[in-house]
Amino acid sequence: MGSPLRAFVRIAAYLAVTVALVPIQAFAVRFNRKLSVRLPLFYHGLCVRILGFQIRTHGKMAANGPVLFACNHTSYSDISILGALLPASFVAKAEVAGWPFFGGLAKLQRTVFVDRRPAKATMQRDEMVQRLEDGDNLILFPEGTSSDGNAVLPFKSALFSVAQVEPNGEPLLVQPVSIAYTRLDGMPVGRALRPYFAWYGDMTLAPHFWEVAGLGHATVDVVFHPPVTIRDYETRKGLAEHCFQVVAGGVSVANAGRLDGLQTLGAS
């Protein structure tokens, strides 16, 4: 479906930009915290443009941190799209750290790697709390895996355990965020075309990335829903269910092309 020439040019440009900026980010992570937060925004913004994504935002990003952004997850391209918008680090499953190339990039963005084994849960929550107390924003994918983009998988309440603590004595802001791939070269992306963007199941990364890079210009809608705290829902299960409902609603409305209704989802 895509153009091999376009794929080659885009991937070559993506690799060139990445190789050029990796040493700068490595330096920043060690010596300049402010730069280590700002440079990924610049880098992901370049990647988004190189790969042909146009981002449309709806709603307002929470401005007063720290914030835990709870997002649905469709593909590895979510990383660059959200990374171009949010001054934040990602929370990822532990095995990502060992991935060739992308694992190294994740470490450079100061990703928090989560091991699902119960014995590791307390230590990892403490690490996330420390990052939040230091003023860092975090991006969480509560589905625990990626989906086909047509619907959002249930959110795992255990991943919201960090929301039970109060960094610096204040309740943690949790902002639900919906992301949907809605148009390709100006035409609506229907159910049959969404797997061209989605990476899930047993798909192999390299061939899928080549195919995505060869596609035309894609429109991605990102919806910022009203932020909440666990105090509004008492338990992490209630918080997870609320976030799931508003994120799933945002994806459904965006996929249907009914953008006018997005701003009201989750509003009190």
Image: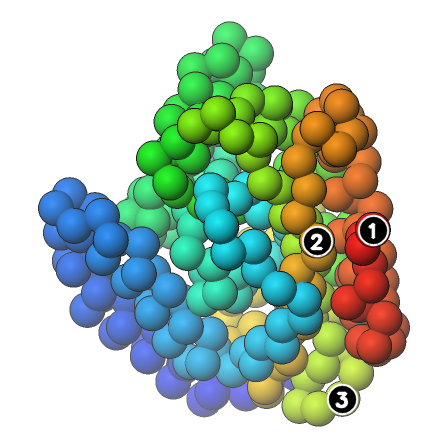
What is the number of callouts on the image?
3
Give yes or no for contact between labels 1 and 2 (Cβ–Cβ under 8 Å). yes
Q: Which residue is mark 2?
A: 226
Mark before the other along the chain sequence, 1 or 2: 2
Please tell me which residue lies in front, 229 or 23. 229
Q: Residue at x 29, y 48 (%)?
A: 108
- The image quadrant where one finds the N terminus is bottom right
The crowd level at tag 1 (other Cα within 10 Å; few <14, some 14-19, many 20+) is few
Would residue 240 appear left or right of 138 to someone viewing this image?
right
Task: Point out which mark residue 28 bears.
Answer: none
Q: Earlier in the sequence, mark 3 or mark 2?
A: 3
Give the mark nearest the N terminus, 3 or 1. 3
Residue located 75% across and 43% down the image: 243
In the figure, residue 181 lies in which quadrant?
A: bottom right
Q: CA distance from mark 1 to mark 2?
A: 8 Å
| Residue 206 seen in render | no
Q: Looking at the image, is mark 1 or mark 2 nearer the viewer?
A: 1
Q: Measured from the top left, where is residue 112 in percent x and y? A: 42, 35
Q: What is the three-letter code of the residue carrying label 2?
A: Pro
Quarter-wise, where is residue 151 in the image? Answer: bottom right
Horizontal side of 98 relative to 30 (left or right) equals right
**Which amino acid type corresponds to the residue marked 1 in the rendered image?**
Ser
Q: Is any part of residue 42 visible from this angle? A: yes
Say which mark, if any, is on residue 268: 1
Element type at mark 2: loop
What is the C-alpha distance between the residues marked 3 and 1? 33 Å
Residue tagged 3: 187
What amino acid does circle 3 point to?
Answer: Met
- Answer with left or right where residue 91 lies relative to residue 109: right
Measuring from the top left, give residue 133's x and y in whole percent. Answer: 39, 31
Measured as percent of width and height from the top left, residue 214 is found at: 53, 81
Closest to the observer, 250 or 26 = 250
